[in-house]
Image: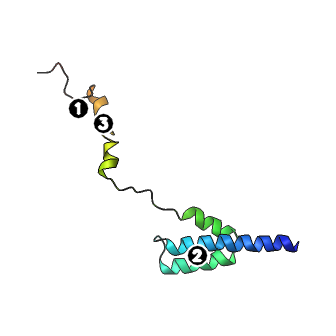
Amino acid sequence: MEIFLCFLAISHIFLAWKVQKKINQTNFLNPSQKNLNSILNWTIPFIWGLIVKSMIKPSAFQVMTKKNRKGKIGKHTDNWDQLTGSGLGGHHENEN
């Protein structure tokens, strides 16, 4: 039983340390929220750490560079071609 409790304590300390690191690094929380999350992280074993770790994620925004745009050239994001019935934005090849 003592071995199990030691393993549980060590695993809680490891998880709480990783979550604490994530709390300190995030820009999504203000200082008072960081303090509250830190207290809850260390006092509520495992549960709060898993909740915080799943909620604090880096944003999915991506910087649009020339390299990123090159892959998107030729891919139409609107339905203009489908509405006009051609792939040339409404100008049919037979029109003069």
The amino acid on which the numbered mark 1 sits, given as a three-letter code, is Gly
The quarter of the rendered structure image containing the C terminus is top left
Is 94 above or below relative to 20?
Answer: above
Q: How far across and down, in percent of the image, does residue 40 sit? A: 64, 76
- Report how many numbered discs are placed on residues in the image: 3
Q: CA distance from mark 1 to mark 3?
A: 12 Å
Residue 48, image x and y in percent? 65, 70
Query: Residue drawn at (35%, 42%), measured in percent from left and top?
Result: 71
Nearer to us in this view, 21 or 27: 21
| Disc 3: which residue | 74
Query: In this image, 55 relative to 76: left or right?
Result: right
At horizontal 76% and vertical 74% (from top left) the residue drawn is 9
Badge 2 amino acid: Asn
Residue placed at 58% from the left, 76% from the top? 37
Callout 1: few (<14), some (14-19), or many (20+) C-alpha neighbours within 10 Å? Answer: few
Give the farthest residue toward the right: 1
Q: Earlier in the sequence, mark 1 or mark 3?
A: 3
Front position among marks 1 and 3:
3
Residue at left offset 65%, top offset 73%: 16
| Marking on residue 37 | 2
Which amino acid does the dot numbered 3 rest on?
Gly
Of the numbered discs 2 and 3, the one sitting upstream in the chain is 2
- Residue of label 1: 89
